[in-house]
Image (cartoon, rainbow, N blue to C red):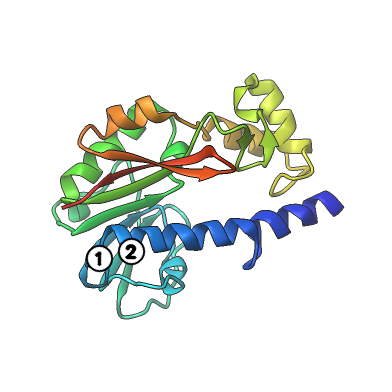
C-alpha cells in the first residue's frame, strides 16, 4: 500500500510530478499554436475536464472518447462516443483547426489501427499535436515499471497484476491481459512514418526522451 500511495504522489495527484509535466505540456501546446484560444479543436481520446484546467482553452473543443461521456457540458465543448480509428462519417465530414491527442496512440490496438487514426488526423485539420510515451524511456509509464515494455507478454501480465506501483494492483488476469495487449509503446521511426509531414519533438526527463510528439503547424 505504501508503494501504491507513492504512485499517487508521483503520477496521479493534482500536485504530483506527473501533473506538473502535463501542465508544462499544456503551456508548450499554447506556445506552439499562438491562436489556440480561437481554434476549433478535435480531441481524440481526451476528456472535457482536462481542457477546463489548461491556461489557454480553445474556442471550441470536440472530445471523442470510448469512455462514458459527461452529461453536463460547458458551452465551449461537445462530446461523442466513438472510436478514434473508425470515426463516424458525421465527424469525418467536418473540418477542424487542430487535432489533438495525448497518450492515446499507444492504446488503439496495433499498427494498422494506429495508421487509420493517423490518416484521419491528417485529413481532419491542417494542424495536429499527437503525443505518445516513448518506447525506449527506461520506465514504462502506465505501470511505472522499469523495462516492462521489453518483457514477454506473460511477464508483462504478471507485472500488471502484481507490481505495487500499478494503477490497480491485484487486478484479475483477464483484465491485466487485455490492458497489456492494448498498450504498445512506439518509437520515433514509426511516429515519423505515421506522420510524414510532422516535426517530431521530444519531451525529456533527466536528459532522456520520455515522450515524443508529432506536430504540424498550419
Residue 35 lies, with reference to residue 1, above or below; the image says below
Single out the residue that lies furthest toward the top. 152
Residue 68 lies, with reference to residue 149, above or below; the image says below
Mark 1 residue crowding within 10 angstroms, few (<14) / some (14–19) / many (20+) = few
SS label for mark 2: helix
Determine the residue positioned at 41% across, 40% down: 105
Residue occupied by mark 2: 30
Q: CA distance from mark 2 to mark 1?
A: 6 Å
Q: Is residue 1 visible?
A: no
Q: Quadrant of residue 114?
A: top left
Q: Quadrant of residue 118?
A: top left
Relative image position of residue 41 (x, y in whole percent): 26, 62
Observer-nearest residue: 151 or 108? 151
Q: Quadrant of residue 56?
A: bottom left
Relative image position of residue 1 (x, y in whole percent): 85, 53
Determine the residue positioned at 20% across, 51% down: 217
Observer-nearest residue: 121 or 66? 121
Position of 121 with respect to 169 (left or right) is left
Determine the residue positioned at 86% across, 53% down: 2
Residue occupied by mark 1: 34
* Label 2–label 1 contact, CB within 8 A: yes
Position of 133 with respect to 2 (left or right) is left
Determine the residue positioned at 13% across, 53% down: 93
Relative image position of residue 128 (x, y in whole percent): 26, 50
Residue 10 lies, with reference to residue 182, above or below; the image says below
Single out the residue that lies furthest toward the front. 207
Single out the residue that lies furthest toward the bottom. 75
SS label for mark 1: loop
Amino acid at each position: 500500500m505504501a508503494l501504491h500511495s507513492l504512485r499517487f504522489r508521483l503520477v496521479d495527484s493534482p500536485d504530483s510530478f506527473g501533473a506538473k509535466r502535463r501542465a508544462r505540456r499544456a503551456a508548450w501546446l499554447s506556445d506552439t499554436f499562438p491562436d489556440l484560444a480561437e481554434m476549433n479543436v478535435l480531441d481524440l481520446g481526451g476528456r472535457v475536464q482536462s481542457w477546463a484546467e489548461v491556461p489557454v482553452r480553445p474556442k471550441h473543443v470536440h472530445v471523442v472518447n470510448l469512455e462514458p461521456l459527461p452529461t453536463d457540458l460547458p458551452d465551449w465543448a461537445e462530446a461523442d462516443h466513438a472510436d478514434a480509428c473508425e470515426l463516424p462519417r458525421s465527424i469525418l465530414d467536418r473540418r477542424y483547426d487542430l487535432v489533438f491527442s495525448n497518450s492515446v496512440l499507444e492504446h488503439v490496438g496495433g499498427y494498422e489501427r494506429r495508421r487509420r487514426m493517423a490518416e484521419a488526423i491528417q485529413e481532419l485539420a491542417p494542424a495536429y499535436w499527437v503525443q505518445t510515451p516513448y518506447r525506449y524511456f527506461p520506465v514504462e509509464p502506465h505501470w511505472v515499471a522499469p523495462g516492462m515494455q521489453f518483457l514477454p507478454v506473460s511477464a508483462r501480465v504478471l507485472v500488471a497484476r502484481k507490481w505495487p506501483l500499478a494503477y490497480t494492483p491485484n487486478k484479475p488476469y483477464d483484465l491485466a491481459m487485455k490492458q497489456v495487449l492494448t498498450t504498445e509503446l512506439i518509437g520515433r521511426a514509426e511516429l515519423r512514418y505515421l506522420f510524414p509531414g510532422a516535426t517530431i519533438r521530444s519531451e525529456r526527463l533527466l536528459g532522456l526522451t520520455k515522450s515524443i510528439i508529432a506536430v504540424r503547424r498550419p
